[in-house]
Image (tube, rainbow, N blue to C red):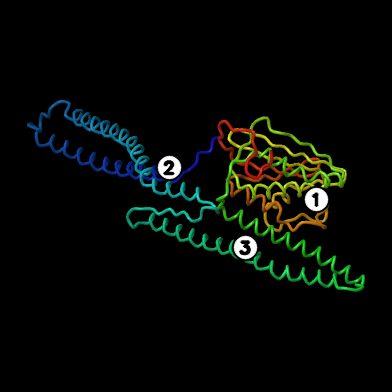
Amino acid sequence: MIKVRRTVRMRLTVLYSVLFVISSVVLLGITNGVGSTSVSSAAVATRPDPVNPPVGSGDVRMSVSHGYLLGSLIALGVMAVVSVVVGWLAAGRALRPLRAMTAATRRISADSLHERLAMQGPKDELKDLSDTIDALLERLDGAFGAQRRFVANASHELRTPLATVRALVDVAAAKPGPVPVETITLADRVRVELDRVDELLDGLLALARGQHGALPDRAVIALDQAVSSRLAPRADQLADRGLQLHRVHSLEETWIVASQPLLSRMIDNLLDNAILHNRDGGWIRVATAVSGSTARLVVENGGDVLAQEEVAELGRPFRRLGVERTGSDTAGAGLGLSIVAAIAEAHDGSLDLRARADGGLRVTVALPRAAVSGAADAALPGVPA
């Protein structure tokens, strides 16, 4: 059974048509009654002989009444159809500003909260609605901006005390003379924790920059080459874990327009996630492909069977799976994939997370392709040849 979508335009059209038909029926009834009375009065006034009335005068009155009623019904039917068409057009014209507001609101995202509807026209209900949405967007823009500035400023400000603590630890461990073993052990543990805090701050800075959406350092980059350049330094890390790498190259050019530092950070996070959250002796598959106007980077890894509901949450900051996820208790702060999502969105792309049926995770990043004609194989900025 086909379910008809009851839009506001359709409901307004039905309302206009029903009101027109009801008004027409009432008017037709009144007019028909008055017309019948007039015909009867005329017939009485023109009767010449009450003893010998004209033959067929009643038939004449009935014929006139029926003809008048039939013509009125035909006119009513035609006008009812016309009212539906006119009502549909009138409703569409009345709702045109609302459709424009809906389209403009859909275009506005977290990266374009500075845009406004700025609807022009008389001060009516639609103008009030537009102004209300603009005020809401202004408040959201301010809140998002304050959050991003806080993360960036806090990350920068925290580096000074961390550097001071690191220097004090190094000085304590490098004092002349014999240093107690406990001091050296404590210094090593503090350095490890400081490294983790530095990594967390780097992640917060990358997340804030990715969410900001302003990328003035964009350049045309070959995604396939960029992935290969980030894979090369990880050969020893893969060998230490006994991980088997399956690399699939795209058959077409994977040119994209991207910020090279952020793109490198995104690829690093994907590869680190696949290595850290994997089983020793497992596998990793890294593929680049092209589909229409989209370039895709797919990173898959083996591991335990994961629930799709939990996997879908990994793109949010500080979200991690429990200790059942291999390696989740030893590394990571839950920012890796959220940074990937923020960087992908800043480049007008998307992140898709899927739990594999036989265990592990499949991560797909889709980015808009760049139309580069006659692109050479020479190295691009930040991408080795």
Identify residue for label 3. 152
Query: In this image, 384 relative to 63: left or right?
Result: right
Q: Nearer the viewer, residue 276 or 43?
A: 276
Identify the amino acid type marked 3: Ala
Label disc, if present, on residue 177 of the rendered structure: none
Residue 10: which numbered mark, if any?
A: 2
Instruction: Using the numbered discs, state the Cα–Cα distance from disc 3 to disc 2 in whole angstroms.
Output: 50 Å
Residue pictured at 47% horizontal, 54% vertical: 115
For this rendering, which residue is in front, 108 or 214? 214
Percent from the top left, x then y, of residue 265?
68, 50
Q: Nearer the viewer, residue 371 or 5?
A: 371
At x 69%, y 41%, the residue is 384
Answer yes or no: do the residues labelled 3 and 2 have beta carbons within 8 Å?
Answer: no
- Which residue position is annotated with label 1? 276
Quadrant of residue 331 within the rendered picture = bottom right
The residue positioned 85% from the left and 65% from the top of the image is 188
> Marks 2 and 1, how far apart in space?
56 Å
